[in-house]
Amino acid sequence: MMRQYRELKRRYPDYLLLFRLGDFYETFFEDAEVAARLLQITLTSRQGAPMAGIPHHAADGYIARLVRAGRKIAISEQLEAPDKAKKLLKRDVVRIMTPGTITDTAYLAGAANNFLLTVVRGREARGVALLDVSTGDFWVGEDGAREDAVLAAALLRRPAEILIPARTREDRALLARLEASGATLTFWEPDAGGPRRAAADLCAHFQVDALDRFGVGDMTAGVEAAALALAYLRATQGAALGHLRHLTRLTAVDAMVLDATAVETLELLQGSGGDARASLFGVLDRTMTAMGARLLRHWLLRPLVDPAAVDERQAAVAALVAEPARRARLRASSGPWVTSRG
Amino acid sequence: MGDLERLTSRAALGQAHARDLVGLRACLAPLGEIRETCRGVEASLLAAAAADLADLEPLRALLETALVDEPPLGLHDGGIIRESWNDALGAIVREAREARDWIAGLEERERVRTGIPSLRVRFNRVFGYGIEVTHAHTARVPDGYIRRQTLTGAERYVTAELKEYEAKVLGADERRRRLEHELFEEVRRQVGAQAAELLTTARALARLDALASLGEIAHARGHVRPVVDRGDGLSIVDGRHPVLEAHPGVVVTPNDVAQDGLAPIVILTGPNMSGKSVYLRQTAHIVIMAQMGAFVPAREARIGVIDRIFTRVGAQDNLARGQSTFLVEMVETATILNNVTPRSLVLLDEVGRGTSTFDGLAIAWAVVEALHEQGRGAKVLFATHFHELTRLAGRLPGVRNFHVAVREWNDEIIFLHKVQPGATDRSYGIQVARLAGLPPEVIARAKALLAELEEAGQVRADARDAVQLGLFASAAPDPIVTELTTLDLAHLTPLEALNLLHKWQAQAVGAGAATPARAVGVRAAAEGEASL
């Protein structure tokens, strides 16, 4: 059995491997030490190997805690019914959970997106894609040579996980910057196919002839970044990604630029001392739903620069200010949040 | 209302639990009501959002008839699907229920038949159903009872008939679990198939919700609709700090902002704690709120579109990260100078604080000059305790002075938090220190020192002219410097070089008494120049 464990662990070296043993998911060796520390569960041993287990019926909560601590999890199951004869059961990894790919509303902060960021260096440009599989938001952008605004804007959205091709490991400066964001870094290299193959992949997924439809037909590295994100999700979450139906162009110029320093010093999301309620977002947020809160947060971090667009939004606000009864009915219908705000 | 966006995504991914779909069902219930509420709205965004709410009533009805109201967490234990929804499921459930009813009635029937009052029918996970009879009554057990197990105080029996019904119950339960799971997956597929409509609807709900939230805040706090245009003005009348004013019991002092392309730079002076930083943040908040489409906390506001807000606020903030304050400060200042455009808003709070006074003042001075030159109209708010900077207003046409008003009373100060035109000439540091609770003896000593320093400063200022005169009049170059500049390094041996060094050192030591005086003179000159 330990040979079977080692074989699975060899295939998933960067993951904390949960090994199904009867009613428990067991972890061994270093994984067991990590799990025992993060989950405050007992560290025991089996045939001399450190071991820590979580009961299968309560696994969801434990797994969520590991993921929130930035760990990537591989879950292996017993693929045959236990037999009276004591032979070794077939086991395999059936699910991968990572900080950037979880969808369970019980463990995600309602008012914030949970983004997977991919960064791909192309010949002339650097491609950036932001994908929240839990909401279907999918952004793609590119920085030209010596440009940086799109990556900066993407990092501002505080991705939970950053995925980069293994070859990017050599770019020390980029790596240091991505690490500084606090997100979990994942190196992954599907069979590289270049921009053309990436574009074909995306077209096939979105069932379109060309990516022009999303206004991103001119991109190369950006398209690769988007295809990488999609491929990673397919590999970890399975093929059912039909709810991802749009690509949106991520640019730095269609909005007021607020960099990380500004967001911090102006206390837009957190007041001094880290209190979210003492921030600008905290005092402006009177939304009734999680998706409304995420949108308001998006508006706050990307204020408009087109006066006509501002005017259009103001007109809607003015109408709702002028009609308190309608506003009250609208808010009452949306009801209070039913999930915790996280 | 639940998180329709995420619940839909989970359904599409095939990850949704029964509870997720029940939550999704609840999101769909008020759609008709919301559509009705939006009827007749004229604002284009509201009308468009209302039009985007898809007709999901058939899907809601499906979920309503298929799923029970409070399903369990697991998907494999049954109890998810209403038995009325599927005939086969209904039949299985009925079959199981009849078998259970038969078993439930068995205890009473057997008691009557055997006359054993303590006879009990029990279920055990290992052995299944059994009839327990205490040892005292085992003699009265009828034919057909098969003994299975001896317990303390009782014997366990089964009968062929009981086994038959037990098999019915367990078999029906197993078939029910499997069927329910299949049915659930089918329901989940149907939800996933409508992911596009669901997500469009979720996003429309999000827009309505966010707009209503902005309306709610504007109404509750008395915010006004600002004018946002392509002009070069930044004008706010009676602006308030949106976060502070939301704090119950806090009285905020309204302040104006009036900057335009001709006079885009404001040097803001005032004692520590007087509210300079609040004024800077408040201005940025109002600009952000205006451009996100919100109303703003002011009497009126007109804002020429700002393309980027740069900040350098709070010199202490980065200390915790172990980086040099000064280095961080300079990196951020460099970013500002390299990227500023005429449409930018630049907030600088005490730039130059992280180094010595003269370095700091010189850097601050140069930064303002550069922003005046390169910013070409960028709005700059520069809060500083360097009063010398206020002299920039007289030298650069785009720079004006403002200060935060303070009232002095009996050697105490009262913060008025009011920003007014003009400069201050004092920092009130000692008064602020007293307010902060520094012990009286320390305050008294500081005052004495201040008086001493001010007097010495006067003396030095007198001396300064002499030093400066001296510098310009007796421009006799230092003999060492003269020798050094004419030296031919290419033909110098190391030994000769060492000998020369030795000679110069001897000369320098000889003139030792004069050296410190020269250093003071240069410093004083630097200060004098900066404060011109």
Image: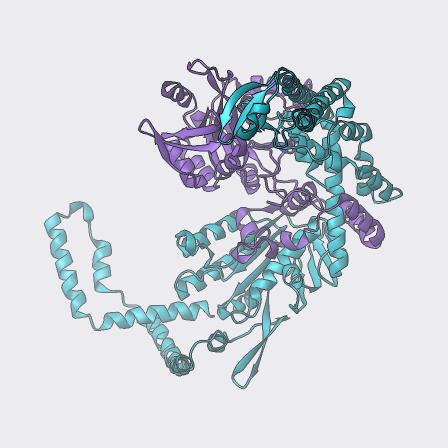
Q: State the image quarter where residue B440 is shown.
A: bottom left
Residue at 42% across, 54% down: B320
Q: In this view, does A124 lie to the left or right of B35?
A: left
Q: In this view, does B361 lie to the left or right of B233?
A: left
Q: Chain A is drawn in which colour?
A: purple
Residue B398 in view here: no
Task: Return the x and y of residue B81 as percentages of the image width and height.
Answer: 72, 26
Q: Is residue A104 left or right of residue A174?
A: right
Task: Return the x and y of residue B468 as percentages of the image width and height.
Answer: 36, 73
Q: State the image quarter where residue A154 is shown.
A: top right
Which is nearer the eye, B165 or B4?
A: B165
Query: Looking at the picture, does residue B453 appear above or below residue B189?
Result: below
Query: Looking at the picture, does residue B194 appear above or below residue A269?
Result: above
Which is nearer the eye, B73 or B377?
A: B73
Q: State the image quarter where residue B35 is shown.
A: top right
Query: Looking at the picture, does residue B127 appear above or below residue B280?
Result: above
Query: Looking at the picture, does residue B353 appear above or below residue A291?
Result: below
Q: Which of the chains is cyan?
A: B
Task: Return the x and y of residue A20 as percentages of the image width and height.
Answer: 47, 25
